[in-house]
Amino acid sequence: MTFSNRKPPSMRPVIPLALSLAFLGTAAFAQHDRGEFIDAFDADRDGRLTRAEYDAGRAARFAATDTDRDGTLSETEYVGEYTARLERRLAASSDPEGRKTEERQRQTRQAKVRFGVLDADRDKRISRAEYDRVGARSFDEQDVDRDGAVTAADRRAPHDRG
Ligand SMILES: [Ca+2]
Ligand SMILES: [Ca+2]
Ligand SMILES: [Ca+2]
């Protein structure tokens, strides 16, 4: 780790690690992120992400990300899949180019941090087991009312109430 290129705090160059971890654990998911979480894998588009839809969608994403078909995800594969989705989103955005460039850099850094967290045994590969472990934890944390599906009814996490 190097701090030689540290930028002024006002530029917020690096998302604090704890916050990046929260993206994985999803404890700090904002409401619009929950919508994205549902939309990403809600195959029948009924606004209700079942565990079966989630597992099928994640399995498909893992397979699509594993471009060399070795059964694991390298950092290049993982970050590449993410940035391809990011580029589609940026292409559809009306934000100015400068903003998009910042977003691209920030999100790419975060994707690399997520790769490091997903790669629990630090062998530079995300195994299917590592991928599924984090996926299951994310789903459980989103499914606030524990009925086996993530919906808008799960919107309010317990700590948001009252
Ligand atoms: Ca559904
Ligand atoms: Ca691979
Ligand atoms: Ca690993």
Image (cartoon, grey):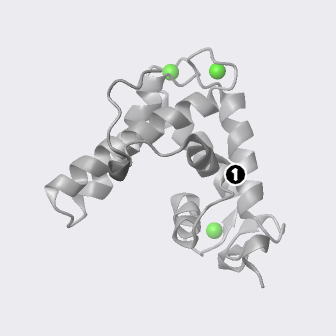
Work out whether 95 lies above or below 69: below
Q: Badge 1: how crowded within 10 Å, few (<14), some, or many (20+)?
A: some
Residue shown at the point (69%, 30%) measured from the top left:
130
Location of residue 106 (image quadrant): top left
Q: Nearer the viewer, residue 1 or 54?
A: 1
Tag 1 residue: 138
Task: Say if residue 67 shows up in the picture.
Answer: no
Work out whether 127 lies above or below 135: above
Q: Residue furthest top?
A: 123
Q: Nearer the viewer, residue 67 or 91?
A: 91
Residue shown at the point (58%, 22%) measured from the top left:
72
Side of 26 where 90 appears, left or right: left
Q: Is mark 1 within 8 Å of ligand 1?
A: no
Location of residue 84 (image quadrant): top left
Q: Amino acid at mark 1?
A: Ser
Work out whether 35 lies above or below 19: below
Query: Secondary structure under badge 1?
Result: helix
Q: Looking at the image, how many numbered discs can be counted on the residues?
A: 1
Q: Residue furthest bottom?
A: 162
Q: Residue furthest left?
A: 97
Give residue 147's position: percent from left, percent from top: 83, 69
Side of 99 where 117 appears, left or right: right
Give residue 44's position: percent from left, percent from top: 57, 68
Residue shown at the point (60%, 45%) measured from the top left:
58
Give residue 109's position: percent from left, percent from top: 41, 37
Task: Say if residue 56 shows up in the picture.
Answer: yes
Give residue 78's position: percent from left, percent from top: 47, 32
Residue shown at the point (31%, 51%) measured from the top left:
103
Q: Nearer the viewer, residue 61 or 136?
A: 136
